[in-house]
Image (tube, rainbow, N blue to C red):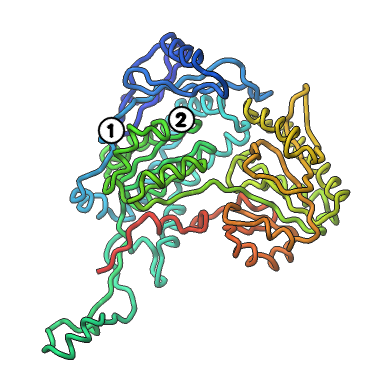
Amino acid sequence: MNGPTIAADRDGVIAVPALVRGTLVTPPAIGKGEIEAAFAAVDREQTGGDPKTRVRLHEAWVLREPVLDRASMRATGAWQYQVMPAVTPLEVIEDDLDALAAGLYELEFAEVVRYVEGLQQAYGDDADLLQQVKAWVRATSEAPDPYVDAGLAMFPVMLAASVAETMVDTDLATWEIPGRRFLDGWVEVPGTVYPAPVHMIHAQHLPPIAGYDAADATPRLRALPTRQLHITAGNSPLVPLASLLRALWTKSAATIKLPYGATLAGAYLALLAARTFPDHPLTRHLSVLYWPGGDEQFEAPLFLPGRYDRIVVWGAPGSVLSVRERAAFTKTVTFNPRYGVSLIGREAFDDLPQAVGRAVCDTLIQSQKACIASQIHYLEADQAGAERYAAALRDELGRWDGFAPAALSRSQQGQIRRMKRGSFLGATWFENRAGGEYHSAVAVMPQEFNITEHPMCRLIVVRPVASLEDALRFLHPGVATAGVYPEPRRRELAVRIGARGVSNVPPLGQAGYTYPGMPHDGMLVLSELVDWKTS
């Protein structure tokens, strides 16, 4: 198909267009030699830590990601380069509120359904491009190939019309009225209208005014779309997709920031929207692009009061806090950095393979990089029992290492070495190693530790406890999910666990389950993204 696309030149440099309010903007052509020279210059200035990931050249951002050997998941020494246009912040800001009110906001929800259904049907139309994008994503992804393939396979599933309908009708429902009706217009809702004290005073001292009786008033409610800025995280290609869909489902004008590590899949969706529905209001009011997170020059204009109605931010603690502080006068929806745990009763030893299989499934969600992935297993056992359980966990992790090996960055490897020499010196370690290198491990830890030390790279910390009730003191709002085994113990503890701020209390092994309309971090997110108006 003619027009802008995602394409590599003869040297393998990938040009990635940005979608700027419905228009595809292509980056300038920059040769590999100039790119390598620019990165060589920043590398010479680098004094430590992981290599720089980006440089600014001409009117473009150039990203580099290390190419990994897919069998060993070790860096090959080669780089994949992506060139993306550097647009100005004012180009993505929607400031014509009357045009939005008359156009996008009055769109019927049935048209939203037709739009996402059209994207789903077009998802694989350009099979060659889709396969090339998948190959580029696999080449650099720290997630094993089975995870990459499964994640990308979810795109057409999430674009289904039934998902859009269920999400909106459940998330925005009130008074048993389906949510789509509130998106489509003003809805009369049942209820008694009560006068304010001023009306009572008026009735006592002044003649009545025709039509000024609360008994004659009809309450009406509407879920009005908003202008949304989504600052996404790169731990999964599904994160930009989730933000994009939430904007589409709520008929909202949106700017989606593509994160380092998940640019190509998001750019492919933007390209799909521009090709499939180039003149559609949902496309014309959509921007999907990259800029460096925390770039003050780019982000300061976006965070000014009145520029956006909602800011949605995912990411590390510093990133979330920074956005909150700089966007203090805009309603900000945050998906804070959290982690998962498992609470496993002594009954696990009655069928240890089943319990361990379930527990590892909860741990290896997104190869342990997801905020719901279990990092700590609180086990009802003594030290000997904990070590028996840990040995079984190590063996199960080893099986996963065989068919879905994970990549460890230099910083993660260094962090594990520091933990073993420092705060985890008293832990009993059960490791899977090959060629002298760490692949995965279980550490039985008798004392408390700082969870921020955890490198999120297939390391399970087992904490033996006398009872699951004793583990409750370790729970707080920073824990996203707590899978519990066995089921009777889960039903017994679920409310007490939830009372401590945990959002999801599933059976062990089901932490990764999801369904349309499911709350996220304790929120019905679509209800947070619309403005509820009364009339």
Q: Nearer the viewer, residue 37 or 349?
A: 37
Mark 2 and mark 1: span between their CA atoms? Answer: 17 Å
Picture quadrant where residue 297 is located: top left
> Label 1, on which residue?
23
Mark 1 falls on what kind of element? strand
- What residue is at 68 percent from the left and 31 percent from the top? 405
Residue 109 image offset from top left, x and y in percent: 33, 55
Q: Amino acid at mark 2?
A: Leu
- What residue is at 18 percent from the left and 88 percent from the top? 203
- Residue 231 seen: yes
- What residue is at 58 percent from the left and 43 percent from the top? 370
- What residue is at 74 percent from the left and 61 percent from the top? 470
Residue 487 image offset from top left, x and y in percent: 72, 62
**Which quadrant: the N terminus?**
top left
Q: Is residue 448 above or below residue 439?
A: below
Q: Amino acid at mark 1?
A: Thr
Picture quadrant where residue 218 is located: bottom left
Q: Nearer the viewer, residue 128 or 27?
A: 27
Residue 429 image offset from top left, x and y in percent: 80, 38
Residue that lies at the very extreme toward the bottom in this rendered image: 204
**Which quadrant: the C terminus?**
bottom left
Quick one: label 2 or label 1, which is nearer the N terminus?
1
> Label 2, on which residue?
264
Mark 2 falls on what kind of element? helix
